[in-house]
Image (cartoon, rainbow, N blue to C red):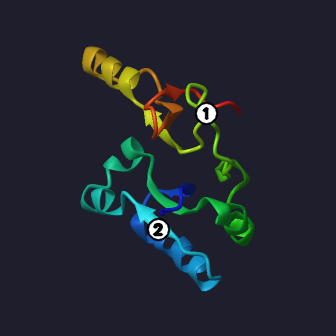
Amino acid sequence: MTENLVTIGRYSTPYEAHMVKSRLESEGIPAFIADEYTIGINWLYSNALGGVKVRVPAPLASEALQILAPEIEPSATYNVEAEACPECGSKNTEDFLDKRNSFLTWMLFGLPLLLPREKRRCKECGHCWRPSK
């Protein structure tokens, strides 16, 4: 059985994410990096993909954030509690950026006038919603 992973940090470059991963692994917390190769090949994709993500197993997320607390800016903290899907009640959810409106305005006007929105997606039923803050 695989554990749910949660994102505890987003970084502009792969080397920043690897420094955080090394710090967590030195404390015994397994950490994984997402989107490092895509952004490593073309760093301009960093903003579009939401940066290089450091992910840890959900039960260890609070401990990982405590370890990184002196190193993380207050505005960079993330909600590590899995929000249940309003449709099916599953806690198997993930964060993503909905960039459709931004892309549409970019195609029509040549500028991304609307910012991407943070949303959650249920991995069980596929339902998407705006997370409660």
Is 18 drawn above or below residue 119 in the view shown? below
Give residue 85's position: percent from left, percent from top: 58, 32
Is 80 drawn above or below residue 126 in the view shown? below
What residue is pinned by disc 2?
32
Q: Nearer the viewer, residue 107 or 10?
A: 10
Q: Considering only order in the chain, which callout, 1 or 2, is on the residue closer to the N terminus?
A: 2
Give residue 59's position: percent from left, percent from top: 66, 62
Residue type for callout 2:
Phe
The secondary structure type at the circle numbered 1 is loop
In the orientation shown, which residue stands out farthest toward the front? 1
- How packed mark 1 is, by other alpha carbons closer than 10 Å (few <14, some 14-19, many 20 or more), is few
Q: Nearer the viewer, residue 79 or 43?
A: 79
- How packed mark 2 is, by other alpha carbons closer than 10 Å (few <14, some 14-19, many 20 or more), is some
Residue at the image position 61 percent from the left and 27 percent from the top = 86
Is 116 drawn above or below residue 18 in the view shown? above
Give residue 47's position: percent from left, percent from top: 41, 45
Asked which quadrant contains residue 34, the reply is bottom left
Q: Which mark is residue 109?
A: none
Give residue 111's position: percent from left, percent from top: 34, 23
Q: Which mark is residue 89?
A: 1
Asked which quadrant contains residue 123, the reply is top left
Asked which quadrant contains residue 41, the reply is bottom left
Residue type for callout 1:
Gly
Q: Is residue 2 left or right of residue 74?
A: left
Q: Can the viewer see residue 112?
A: no
Is 133 drawn above or below residue 1 in the view shown? above
Residue at the image position 60 percent from the left and 43 percent from the top = 91
Contact, mark 2 vs mark 1 (Cβ under 8 Å): no
